Image: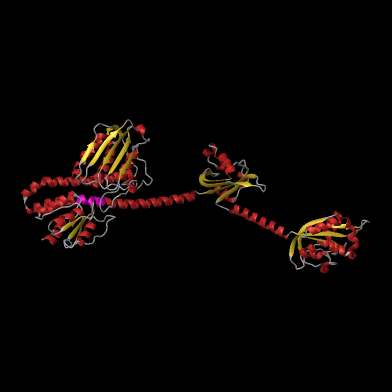
Amino acid sequence: MVDDDPNLQEALSDLLESKGYQVTSADNGVAALDLLRRSDAPCLILLDLMMPVMDGHEFLARLTADSALAKIPVVVVTAGRHPQGSTVTGAAEVLYKPFEAERLMKVVQQFCD
Amino acid sequence: MAADRKNNSPDDLGHVTRSIKPAQADFSSVVELIKGYAFFLLDPDGNVATWNLGAQRIKGYRADEIIGKHFSRFYTSEDVAAGLPAKALRIALEDGRFEKEGWRVRKDGTRFWAEVVITPVTGPGGELTGFVKVTRDLTERKLTEESLRQSRERLRLLVENLRDYAIFFIDMQGTIGSWNSGAERVTGYRPDEIIGKPLSVLYPAGEIEQGRPQRDLDMVGREWRVEYEGWRVRKDGLRFQAEVAMWVLYDDSGTTIGYIVSIKDITERNKAQEEMTLRLAAESALRERDEFLSMVSHELRSPLAALKLNVQTIREELKLGNMERVITKLPDRLDRVQKQADRVEELISRMMNVSVVAAGRTQLVPRAVDLSALAAEVVAELAETAKQANCELSLDAHAPVVGQWSPQHIQEVIRNLLQNALKFGRGKPVQVEVGGDATRAWVSVKDHGIGIAAEDQERIFGRFQRAVNPRNYAGFGLGLWIAKETVEASGGEIGVRSQAGEGATFKVSLPRTLGDRPAGGQTARSSQNDELKSGED
């Protein structure tokens, strides 16, 4: 998961790990791309949009441009509806914060089971 | 020329020419010089006896057409019917001279405005030998005068009928000398009530006391023209906002004879402008409020998402019945729940703070406090945030720096600066330093983060201003604005030194005692200060 909010990282990891998934976190786009290139492809990327260094939009653009990574499904997790926010292109799904754990689990199961 | 011609025909009127011979030299030169005159002789009955070029030019007849004809044909039919030609000759005889201006008729029937002089000519024995008639065409002068009169009349009517402008004349002492209907309408005074009164009756009492009327007179005398917006008083005592103009008035010789005063009531105009300004401010306040609410709700979503996930994770595991894991994990999870609830609470309190600052209702209650201690508390409070941001946070505040400040507001300022430093300087050290001298105290917060470009350094203290792309950093864009408002209300200053990419140092400088700051314990209301009120007092 790529999110700069450590509290959300913790909560999401806890939930997903309690369901038996393995979660690796990065707190911006650059760190995430670096991590992806160094390890095996995950079944799903949970992506925040507003982050320092490299935001979610740019991360998505770089990801889809990289043939080795382009096939990894991305679910955007965003507070959204920000005045300066914009539409998301290249995401399989968008979850708006705060979302239900159940809704998240369905999406994760769809891509990872 | 005409004289020559007359001399060339002495046989016709020998006796007449003879009789005026002594004046002939003058006569010739006059006729030469003034070609604009018809200069001819009439016989005792009023028939034309001689004719000159001036006469031909003015009246249109050639000599052969008119000599021998009665001079009454030069008169209008109305004048002829009234017996004016005969009357003119009679007056000339009786008084020795007839002189009058009036309409005369040319050969082609057109009229011209003539100045006519008829004088009788007598023979050696005193007998009447005829008349000298001099006619001058004054049509042009007459028309000029007429158009001047008309233009004066039009000007008078214009001034008279300017309903929204008081326009009047005052002499050099300021005594009112004329009054138009606009003046009556604007001030309520009738002409008979005000003409002869001093200009000062139209000024508010306070301005009279300060000598304003005389100053205006002096100024217009010196500068020829004075214009300003000010207050005037109506007859009924009501004050109105006026656009006042005064000009010097000269006579033909260029001597100042007084002043013209123009007063326009602009109360309505100003009211309309004020309403427009208020409306625009209200619209902009609404827009800012909407944007603010949108940002607030955005800010609240992250901690709420984490909060819900934490709770739902506990519930999910309870459902699975793995009680041992539930119990092992519970303290951590409850801590996180607590933390997210605290974050939500803090956001709400910041939001309320924004609305209080925005409304200019910050109540500063200064008391003796130690800036070092205040800074130490904030640093301790944000230690966890610093750890999460991977920032090494240090405090350099060895000695107490005591002053008269409102502690929670000063802490809020330090908190704002420190939170910014941790946000924009992630992963790098952040230093807080406190210092002071005899009269002032200061606290600085230094980060080694992304820095602020020179062109943004002023702007970031404005409301909803950020130097960064909101795609990268969350936040209200209000922290520095609140800090600035609070610091300035405390009589202090806030500034930043930074270069893009090389971190930033924010420094707050405060006067130690109440005497070193402006009076009053409230924040100065900013120019657009009524927005973001969360509720009424």
Q: Is residue A24 above or below residue B374?
A: below
In the rendered image, the residue lying farthest to the right is B125
Give the quadrant of the C terminus of chain B. top left
Give the quadrant of the N terminus of chain B. bottom right
- Decide if residue B91 is in sight here: no
Residue nearer the viewer, B269 or A81? A81
Residue nearer the viewer, B438 or B139? B438
- Residue drawn at x 90%, y 62% is B14
Residue A10: x, y in percent?
A: 15, 50
Residue B240: x, y in percent?
A: 51, 45
Q: According to the image, what is the colour scheme of the structure?
A: secondary structure
- Residue drawn at x 64%, y 47% is B250
- Decide if residue B148 is in sight here: yes
Count of marks placed on residues: 0
Left/right placement of residue B56 relative to residue B446 reads right
Left/right placement of residue A56 relative to residue B66 reads left
Q: Is residue B417 magenta?
A: no
Left/right placement of residue B335 relative to residue B16 reads left
Q: Is residue B162 above or below residue B175?
A: below
Magenta range is: B296-304
Which quadrant holds residue B255?
top right
- Residue drawn at x 30%, y 36% is B442
Q: Is residue A94 above or below residue B482?
A: below
Q: Is residue B21 above or below residue B461?
A: below
Q: Is residue B298 magenta?
A: yes
State whether the magenta stretch is mostly helix, strand or loop.
helix
